[in-house]
Amino acid sequence: MLPLLSCSPLWNKSSGSNPRPDGPATSYEYSYNGTMMYPIKYYSVKRDADGAVRIAFLRNSEPEVRMIAGPEDFFARVDALVAEYGLRRLKESYRPRMEVLDGYDWHVRIRFRENAIYSGGFNAGPSGKLASGIAALNQYVESLIDASSEEEVIFRQDYREFLEQE
């Protein structure tokens, strides 16, 4: 659920554009943050050195990132969702038109063979189809995480240490 992404465009300002992606998706990252030390949600999906899809995730502001294997067709599904929802039209930045001193921020990055889609915001985000597209991507990742068991976790690390290695 991305409550901030459904804010009315009348209350949001957006800026920046993304270059047209070229080739298939190669990685997906999403983060939703409050004022806590750790993100509320964090996903990073990439291929490892052997070419296997790996899903690193953190939920509920936990300090530990866990990693599971992902399906081989993960990035084909990402490509399909990017096309279906027109996510290349995401702006780089979303913010409210009024000053907000506390709240949430988020970002999404989808890398392709050439170029990337990057978007983020502070207490604001895209509306309509673009917000639904980000939600669909995250629901797909969540469904894979929910379908995995604790025995399938292949890696654990503190979030801060994990980011240093990224």
Image (cartoon, helix red, strand yellow):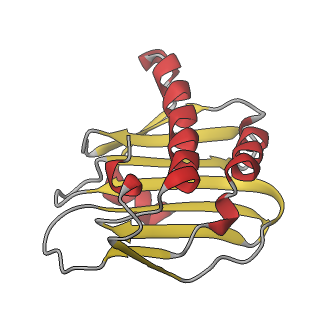
- Inspect this view and state whether residue 148 appears: no
Pinpoint residue 116: horizontal percent, then vertical percent: 68, 69
Query: Going 36% across and 46% down the picture, which residue do you hit?
Result: 41
Reply above or below: 133 against 106. above
Whether 14 is drawn above or below 33: the answer is below
User: On the rendered image, what quadrant is the N terminus found in?
Assistant: top left
Name the residue nearer the viewer: 27 or 138.
138
Q: How many marks?
A: 0
In the figure, is residue 76 to the left or right of 132? right
**Where's residue 58, x and y in %?**
37, 42
Residue at position x 35%, y 54% from top? 32
Q: Residue furthest left?
A: 101
Image quadrant in which you'd find residue 21: bottom right
Q: Is residue 26 positioned above or below 119 on the image? A: above
Residue occupying image coordinates x 67% and y 50% = 85
On screen, residue 15 versus residue 104, left or right, reads right
- Single out the residue that lies furthest toward the right: 23
| Residue 94 spot, x, y in % from top left | 41, 73
Residues 144 and 122: in front is 122
